[in-house]
Image (cartoon, rainbow, N blue to C red):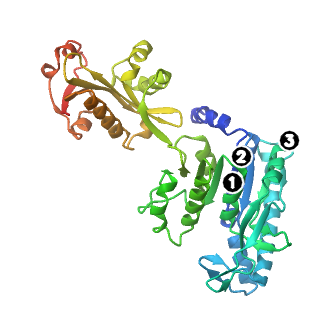
């Protein structure tokens, strides 16, 4: 119960921030067929109940393949893109149509077990995507394979204003009445761009973008994407990453890649600071800066537990307010997750590093090293030659970073007179 209460309290800023925002969600056909699909639908209805304007784009690749196999039709691809001839288009229309009906039915069925129980949830779909043919590439005619030409922004906007969930498929239509098979990633990306969406959410089989060792990459800037594309060649993650970067460069503030196989992945990504997928965003997700008076409350929340354990010297709010300019902080999504302070010692070229603290949930991420580098840089800029630190618990950490054992006698008189012999802190110093 306590964990649930804490989760809800920490989620409340996101609940408020996401209200009235437009999210475009892309779910591939494999995700619709996965056993976790029912949970995803439930989570989408929850988002809708919290005031999020939802556009759901569904794919159908696996369903198309099943129909082609059943009819004995050999699939053809060129440059990793399906060639959609007449018989293939029939399979595409069949797969997309059945999926659309199944999704609408599932959204309706889950109402009784959702936060929207007793309310009428409307799902709207239609000819919102105008497409054009790919044509002939390298001598290969793609026939009915197309690309998005335009998304009906006004039409979709009116339905979102009426509190409908808008459902888009991988089919597009031309002004002459032709039907084109589109990549659902293309539809989702263009919809997010044309609608000016606040977020593009891309579902994949993995929890996000994985590095060479299989570890999750939490955050990326669009300019970092190319370095991963060669490694991911032929992998579906490459398509998701390319879509995320394209949307971000075109003005979509944040794109998230999450798993359709993990129950609750979407909610954890949207309503927790750490998330559990990969975020691609233009703006810096986490910042290192000097503290201001507005940060006092966040600093108290960070360092109070360490003061209670006797790890840090206790500082009152008044002291923090008076000394706030001494602090550098790491801020993540409005939360202060690490801090350190620099105290130049009067009439000397010595300075003290104090109150270095990192939120336990964010340790092992190199933030302590970032803060130490920031403090050393500030000290050098002030003309300091030696940096002191007094510690009771983390002597090894400082020794690993170039600090050497020192003594109270080495401290300038102005600082030595304030030494607390009851704490018996060890003194270390580092030449700058």
Task: Give the residue number, with chain letter if any, for mark 2.
Answer: 22
Q: How far apart are marks 3 and 1 (CA)?
A: 30 Å
Question: Quadrant of the image for the N terminus?
Answer: top right
Q: What element carries label 1?
A: helix
Q: Which badge, 2 or 3, comes first in the chain's sequence?
A: 2
State left or right for residue 112 relative to residue 280.
right
Classify residue 402 by image quadrant: top left
State left or right for residue 71 relative to residue 126.
left
Question: Quadrant of the image for the C terminus?
Answer: top left
Establish if 164 lies above or below 5: below
Task: Give the residue number, with chain letter if any, for mark 1.
Answer: 192
Question: Residue sitting at 57 percent across and 41 percent down?
Answer: 272
Question: Residue sitting at 49 percent across and 65 percent down?
Answer: 229
Q: Can residue 291 be seen in this view?
A: yes
Task: Give the residue number, with chain letter if any, for mark 3.
Answer: 118
Q: How far apart are marks 2 and 3 (CA)?
A: 24 Å
- Pointer 3 local density, CA inside 10 Å: few below 14, some 14–19, many at least 20: few
Classify residue 426 by image quadrant: top left
Q: Nearer the viewer, mark 3 or mark 1?
A: 1
Question: Residue sitting at 78 percent across and 46 percent down?
Answer: 113
Q: Please state which of residues 22 and 120 is positioned toward the viewer in this rendering.
A: 22
Classify residue 188 by image quadrant: bottom right
Q: Is mark 3 on a helix, strand or loop?
A: loop
State left or right for residue 229 relative to residue 70.
left
Q: Which of marks 2 and 3 is in front?
A: 2
Q: Please state which of residues 47 and 110 is positioned toward the viewer in this rendering.
A: 47
- Pointer 2 local density, CA inside 10 Å: few below 14, some 14–19, many at least 20: many
Decide: marks 2, 1 in contact (CB < 8 A)? no
Establish if 297 lies above or below 247: above
């Amino acid at each position: 119960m306590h964990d649930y209460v804490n989760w809800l309290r920490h989620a409340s800023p996101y609940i408020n921030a996401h209200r009235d925002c437009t999210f475009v969600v892309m779910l591939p056909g494999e995700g619709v067929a996965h056993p976790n699909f029912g949970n995803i639908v439930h989570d989408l209805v929850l988002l809708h109940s919290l005031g999020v304007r939802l556009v759901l784009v569904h794919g159908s690749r696996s369903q198309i393949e099943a129909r082609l196999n059943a009819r004995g039709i050999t699939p053809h691809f060129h440059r990793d893109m399906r060639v959609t001839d007449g018989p293939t288009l029939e399979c595409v229309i069949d797969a997309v149509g059945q999926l659309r009906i199944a999704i609408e039915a599932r959204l309706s069925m889950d109402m009784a077990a959702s936060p929207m129980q007793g309310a009428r949830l409307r799902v709207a779909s239609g000819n919102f995507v105008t497409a054009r043919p790919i044509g002939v590439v390298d001598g290969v005619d793609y026939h009915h394979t197309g690309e998005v030409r335009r998304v009906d922004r006004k039409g979709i906007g009116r339905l979102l204003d009426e509190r409908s969930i808008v459902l888009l498929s991988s089919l597009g239509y031309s002004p002459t009445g032709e039907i084109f098979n589109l990549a659902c990633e293309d539809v989702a990306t263009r919809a997010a761009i044309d609608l000016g969406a606040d977020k593009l959410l891309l579902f994949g089989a993995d929890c996000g973008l994985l590095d060479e060792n299989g570890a999750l990459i939490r955050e990326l800037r669009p300019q970092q994407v190319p370095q991963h594309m060669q490694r991911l060649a032929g992998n579906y993650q490459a398509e998701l990453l390319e879509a995320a970067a394209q949307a971000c460069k075109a003005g979509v503030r944040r794109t998230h890649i999450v798993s359709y196989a993990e129950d609750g992945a979407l909610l954890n990504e949207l309503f927790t600071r750490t998330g559990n997928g990969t975020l691609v965003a233009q703006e810096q997700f986490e910042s290192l800066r000097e503290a201001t008076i507005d940060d006092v409350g966040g600093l108290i929340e960070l360092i109070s537990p360490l003061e209670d354990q006797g790890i840090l010297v206790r500082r009152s709010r008044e002291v923090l307010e008076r000394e706030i300019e001494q602090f550098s902080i790491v801020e993540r999504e409005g939360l202060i997750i690490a801090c350190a302070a620099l105290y130049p010692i009067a009439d000397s070229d010595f300075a003290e590093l104090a109150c270095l603290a990192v939120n336990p949930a964010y340790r092992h991420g190199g933030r302590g090293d970032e803060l130490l580098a920031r403090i050393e840089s500030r000290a050098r800029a002030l003309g300091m030659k030696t940096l002191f630190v007094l510690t009771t618990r983390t002597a090894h950490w400082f020794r690993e970073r170039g600090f050497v054992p020192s003594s109270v006698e080495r401290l300038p008189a102005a600082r030595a007179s304030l030494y607390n012999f009851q704490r018996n802190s060890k003194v270390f110093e580092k030449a700058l």
